[in-house]
Image: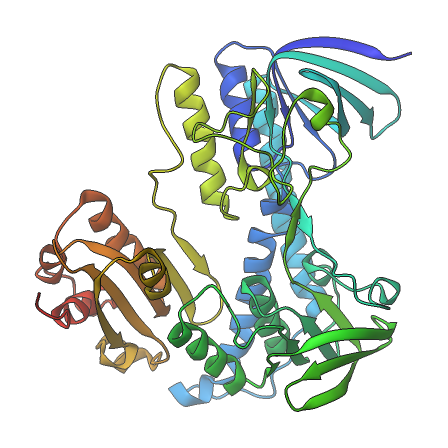
Amino acid sequence: MADFAHFDALVLGSGQGGKLLAWHLARSGQRTANVERRWIGGSCPNIACMPSKNEMWSARMAHIARHAGDFGTSTGPVSTDVAAVRARKRTMVEREVQFHLGQYKSSGAELIMGSGRLIGPKTVEVALNDGGIRTLTAEKLFLNLGTHALLPEVPGLSAAKPLTHIEALELDHAPAHLILLGGGYVGLEMAQIFRRFGSRVTVIEHGARPMAREDADVAQEIQRVLEEEGVELLLSATTFKVEGRSGQEVRVAIRTPSGERTVTGSDILVAVGRVPNTQDIGLEEAGIALNERGFVRVNERLETTAPGVWAMGECAGTPFFTHASVDDFRIIKDNLAGGSRRTDDRLIPYTVFTDPLLAHVGLNERDAERQGIRVRVATLPMAAVLRTEATDEKQGFMKVLVATDDDRILGFTMIGPEAGEVMAVVQTAMVAGLPYQELRDTVFAHLTMAEGLGLLLGNVPAM
């Protein structure tokens, strides 16, 4: 017999925005429940952002150890115990899970572990993980459903049992030869991790360059970095057949401009995109419309087409970054209290955790051209920043876009060490609406990476 309960607020999914909202509403005195299918706290602390960066740091330690002789430190042969890497990662994840459980307890929000499906307006039926059914109704419903890895319809791919980032981060060994489908952000991060763990890595990318959303110079520099480390990138390559089984032997047939060929490896990892978790859970039946790409349709206040229902995070088409989901939470929280915050006037930065890092905020050159915005562009190689004379981290460059008519900074990209921290400085100036000269003439500490901003902005062409 089903168990029925009514709540002031019900959050479906415990990702970054959802859990923060559940904790906030519960602490404000509302009876609140948070339904989560599997990952307590969502994907970021369990299977995505934090675990991948944890293992990436282990990979960086291996890379540094191999090059220690360049800095005068003698080492012997370097190898990576991937089982120990996984253990370190799992310890971090367990700390995060315990932290989240503590937040549910202290806030008073009820965490319900199970799979939810809408069976009516603001009514969710939950198949509990430990058995049984609960039917939950609420005055307010919030959807934080997330996304999952896209598995392209390639003959033989599903039967090969390919890895996604989830399974790859649970490996206890470095694959002999990892074939990676997809040259986007996740794919290239994973490629560098496993190359540094000792795997041979081949990336197969459909497009003419990796990181298709980036400007050509940015993509080319990241490609150069990875190829120098021994990652093989096959571009303009279409996968049309997969044979074998990941973990044993896989054969991937591809078409390239130079003809057909077969790449043979030990494992295959798919990182070609993400799909929202919005299908077959009763959204349309509850009056919640989806857009043409399957994301929940929301307005600039994150309100859905159903009254009293909001959506946040990736399922709502929010940029696929944890910090963007956090801002979704802030928008909904403030608007519930009478505010008027929106999603269409915010500046969302991002960092890709390759080594060196790629950080970006605002427009890039392709955006500006597409939107008909006239800009002045300045660049600076990282080798020109004096700190790199001490660290030898000279790969990459900085690039800034400045408005032609009013000196505002419209965009910034950096490939280099501490890129995310330097980007934050530029983002602050952009939010403040400062003319680029203010940042150009700021006295930055010596020796820092941010010191390069003065040189970069000194290269901005005059109007």
**Residue 421, picture quadrant:** bottom left
Residue 453 percent coordinates (x, y): 20, 65
* Horizontal arrangement in the rendering, residue 160 relative to residue 195 (left or right): right
Residue shown at 62%/33% (left/top)? Answer: 14
**Residue 306, picture quadrant:** top right
Look at the image and tell me in which quarter the N terminus lies: top right
Up the image or down, 380 lies above or below 286; here it is below
Residue nearer the viewer, 320 or 30 = 320
* Horizontal arrangement in the rendering, residue 86 relative to residue 322 (left or right): right
Residue nearer the viewer, 462 or 189 = 462
Residue nearer the viewer, 100 or 304 = 304
Residue nearer the viewer, 448 or 224 = 224
Residue 430 percent coordinates (x, y): 23, 49
Look at the image and tell me in which quarter the C terminus lies: bottom left
Up the image or down, 109 lies above or below 352; here it is above
* Horizontal arrangement in the rendering, residue 214 relative to residue 293 (left or right): left
Residue shown at 74%/80% (left/top)? Answer: 254
Residue 264 percent coordinates (x, y): 79, 84
Residue shown at 36%/60% (left/top)? Answer: 370
**Residue 279, picture quadrant:** top right
